[in-house]
Image (cartoon, rainbow, N blue to C red):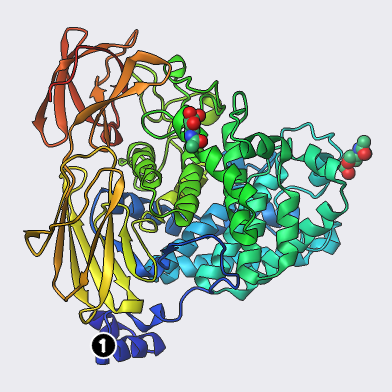
Amino acid sequence: MLLSFGRHGGLQDLASLLALAVGAVMPLSVVAQAVPAVNEETGVSAYAFDMSQVTLSSSRWHDNQDRTLTYIKWVDVDRLLYNFRANHGLSTNDAEANGGWDAPDFPFRTHFQGHFLNAWAYCYAALKDTECRDRAVYFVEELAKCQANNEAVGFKTGYLSGFPETEIDLLENRTLSNGNVPYYAIHKTMAGLLDVWRHIGDTTARDVLLDFAAWVDERTSALSYTQMQNMMSTEFGGMNEVLADVFHQSGDERWLEVAQRFDHASVFDPLASNIDSLNGLHANTQVPKWIGAAREFKATGTSRYKAIASNAWNITVNAHSYAIGGNSQSEHFRAPDAIASYLKEDTCEACNTYNMLKLTRELWLTNPTETSYFDFYERALLNHLLGQQNPESDHGHITYFTPLNAGGRRGVGPAWGGGTWSTDYDSFWCCQGTALETNTKLADSIYFYDSSSLYVNLFTPSVLKWTKRGITITQKTEYPVGDTTTLTIAGGNGGRWTLRVRIPGWTSGATIKVNGKTVSNVDVTPGTYASVTRSWRSKDTVTVTLPMKLHTVVANDDDGIAALAYGPVILSGDYGDATLAATPTLELDTVKQVDGLEFEGTADGETVSLVPFYDAHGVNYNVYWETSGTLSA
Ligand SMILES: *[C@@H]1O[C@H](CO)[C@@H](O)[C@H](O)[C@H]1NC(C)=O
Ligand SMILES: *[C@@H]1O[C@H](CO)[C@@H](O)[C@H](O)[C@H]1NC(C)=O
């Protein structure tokens, strides 16, 4: 801060100087934060911190974030604007067109750009990175120009896309034949605009978004209930979610009514009755609708919405998810409990897990005594999404599927999904878009609060500025390489509140120490929140230990097939470049710890190294084994 004062002049530095003068830890700009939502959500009993209040410290997580930030600050914004400008009759500024799923002839081009808006907004919100802010603001200004030119190109007021509005006619009259999913793309653009409005405070983003929402209202209000339901047999992303969010943000009930038009009866009705009819459905088409149901519950208090969202979560997690937390094979849900029967190259589409994490967080906020939500969140984030990004790629490139076939390898898969890692300008797959968000919001679900407590849900090196209480909490940990995390409190003037720490279901013998002494009378039962209430003083240190042990995660459909885990970490066999003809048999009684998270065991008569699956890159691996014997204690 002092260095930057030396280099630049102007208002920014005056603010920094003032902040220093009053002894504030944070720059003043943090005070002028996001635009708060007008509507108070119904049915929630815990709250997320603003993104500006939590930052990641150095770690594997931080490395992922860095790589994605490098990409979003490097990408040529004019190339990303190409399809919008071309479609709305404006000059493309001699920019080059993109390839992959943003090529000028790709049916749902511009499905991706909204994710850049989200990620730039998160980058600015969390890090006050003005480069990210400026990119978002420029992009939105250019979108506003596209939208303003609608009359000249024959589009209705408010429309905004890289494909012509006639695609919506085709969708509505059910003659759509080119595989287009226009509302799927529109949802993402709207969600991006919303984040630029609420996290950056950009009023152009607000205006473009509200005009776009009014266009959605105009189009959908002209349809009968039956026409609307028929239209929803085409993937439409989270239109109910984003419109409910526009209601929450603006307080205008009009948007809630539009959101509810996107309630898809054939998917919602069985879920409301807790019936699993997911078999055969395109998986990622459904999850955003369930997030929408959770947002609609919080807008209306209607318990049916909550039942839909929580039943969908429970069914997906318990009957359709692999050990790493992902779901789907070839993008589709299979029969309930079909796991061992679908260990293929195209398992676990990453978007589904990104969306399941959003759903998990939404549901937990309504039920913050339930630890199973964040047990799942940790499992899926750690074992699926963390390793979805290629650590060898400075631009944070990703794999679409995470193969779970014997001898699988990240960055391979069917040719239409790339068959490789994503690229700078020639992929733009859905999973590359959602990964921009995943890796720029890794700090958003570590801590939560209510009027009397602080929740610690994830064990991630980070700093929380709990500004309301004047407290800074620093979490230091090697977790999951180590089983201990330390939370150090600074400030707060002896305020009394309760620290609630998630004690995961997989641990036993957890301990909590304050200033080195075990706290008596604290219930550390696995699958509960351990609560410590006291008048906290500056420099108080809380040490949480969550002992890990080896265990198996047995496939629901075959007792003889299992993945191996140590605490929250799924371990995989490292096969280098060797191929596997069949599922190897792991002799469980031979598995022993070598060092930290490095284990070894005997599989098919050979010694195999067993390491965290999130680090299994550049090698063929094995996750699910035929098992024999039992693990030693
Ligand atoms: C459907 O919409 C398209 C695009 O506007 C139009 O060309 C076509 O005639 C419509 N078809 C029917 C059956 O209404
Ligand atoms: C959760 O889902 C599983 C698998 O479908 C089912 O057996 C169980 O009854 C469900 N639990 C609740 C509370 O609905």
**Residue at (68% x, 71% y) in the render:** 207
Taking the image as shown, residue 326 lies to the left or right of residue 98, namely left
Q: Is residue 93 visible?
A: no
Q: Is residue 224 above or below residue 628?
A: below
Q: Position of residue 73 (x, y in %)?
A: 43, 59
**Residue at (60% x, 68% y) in the render:** 249
**Residue at (42% x, 39% y) in the render:** 398
Crowding near the residue tagged with mark 1, few <14, some 14–19, many ≥20 C-alpha atoms within 10 Å:
some
Q: Position of residue 622 (x, y in %)?
A: 30, 21
Q: Position of residue 315 (x, y in %)?
A: 51, 33
Q: Is residue 510 above or below residue 445?
A: above
User: Extreme left residue here?
Assistant: 516
Quadrant assignment for the N terminus: bottom left
**Camera-side residue of 334 and 294:** 294
SS for callout 1 = helix
Quadrant assignment for the C terminus: top left
Res 551 → quadrant: top left
**Camera-side residue of 511 and 36:** 511
Q: Is residue 506 above or below residue 346?
A: below
Give the residue type that dot 1 points to. Answer: Leu
User: Which residue is the site of mark 1?
Assistant: 20
Q: Is residue 1 visible?
A: yes
Res 326 → quadrant: top left
**Camera-side residue of 356 and 70:** 356
Q: Is residue 160 above or below residue 562?
A: below
User: Extreme front residue here?
Assistant: 521
**Camera-side residue of 540 and 355:** 540
Res 325 → quadrant: top left
Ligand 2 neighbours mark 1 (CB distance < 8 Å): no
Q: Position of residue 193 (x, y in %)?
A: 60, 62
In this figure, what is the number of numbered marks? 1
